[in-house]
Amino acid sequence: MIESIFIARGKTEPQVEVAEIELVAGKGIVGDRNFSREQWPGQNVTFIELEEIENFNANYGRAIGAGDTRRNIVTRSVRLDALVGRDFRIGEVVFHGVELCEPCKTLGSLLASDGMAVHEVVRAWVHKAGLRANVLTGGVIRVGMRFTGGAQAQDRML
């Protein structure tokens, strides 16, 4: 289920929580910094599990919020790593899970603290920092909507 949605207008702009977003096939989220960026596969939309944020906070005595990870869509009760290479749906919008959204130095710098260095943050988030996905079919999604599907990419009907 979608717990929260965030967009940022620019690379250094703060994340803004919104109730719904419009997505365009092959381009991503209207109004987001990554809209229509084609440099990297899966740059259209990023997802992260709220459970992983909660685990990070519990394991490291932190209190980061859902928007602090710079991911667009925060989920609950969805194993995002199982969606790599698969198509899935939220409402009318169809996505293709491209790859895990592994942590980078930027995320490490954003979440580092006096008690936790950048490299320690990055290590803590390996294989837990979310999913990169492309938008196959556009539409609108809202907080509270549920995921369906998960068909193998080779089973996708074109």
Image (tube, helix red, strand yellow):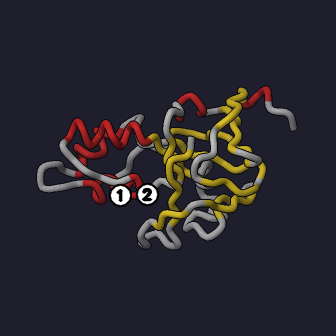
| Residues at discs 1 and 2 in contact (Cβ within 8 Å) | yes
Mark 1: which amino acid? Thr
The quadrant in which the C terminus is found is top right
Nearer-the-camera pick, 133 or 67: 67
Q: Say which residue appears at 17% left-offset and 48% top-offset.
A: 116
Most extreme residue toward the right is 158
Q: Say which residue appears at 41% left-offset and 34% top-offset.
A: 127
Count of numbered marks: 2
The quadrant in which the N terminus is found is top right
Q: For the residue carrying disc 2, how many other residues have a C-alpha within 10 Å: few (<14), some (14-19), or many (20+)?
A: many
**137 to the left or right of 17:** right
* Label disc, if present, on residue 106 of the rendered structure: 1
SS at mark 2 in the image: loop
Q: Position of residue 105 (x, y in %)?
A: 33, 54
Question: How far apart are the alpha carbons under marks 1 and 2?
Answer: 10 Å
User: In terms of image quadrants, where is residue 124?
Assistant: top left
Residue 88 higher or lower than 133, as above or below? above
Residue 40 higher or lower than 83, as above or below? below
Residue located beneath label 2 in the image: 70
Upstream in sequence: badge 1 or badge 2 = 2
Most extreme residue toward the left is 115
Q: Position of residue 44 (x, y in %)?
A: 62, 55
Q: For the residue carrying disc 1, how many other residues have a C-alpha within 10 Å: few (<14), some (14-19), or many (20+)?
A: few
Residue 10 higher or lower than 155, as above or below? below
**71 to the left or right of 139:** left
Mark 2: which amino acid? Arg
Camera-nearest label, 1 or 2: 2
Q: Position of residue 119 (x, y in %)?
A: 24, 46
Q: Say which residue appears at 12% left-offset and 55% top-offset.
A: 114
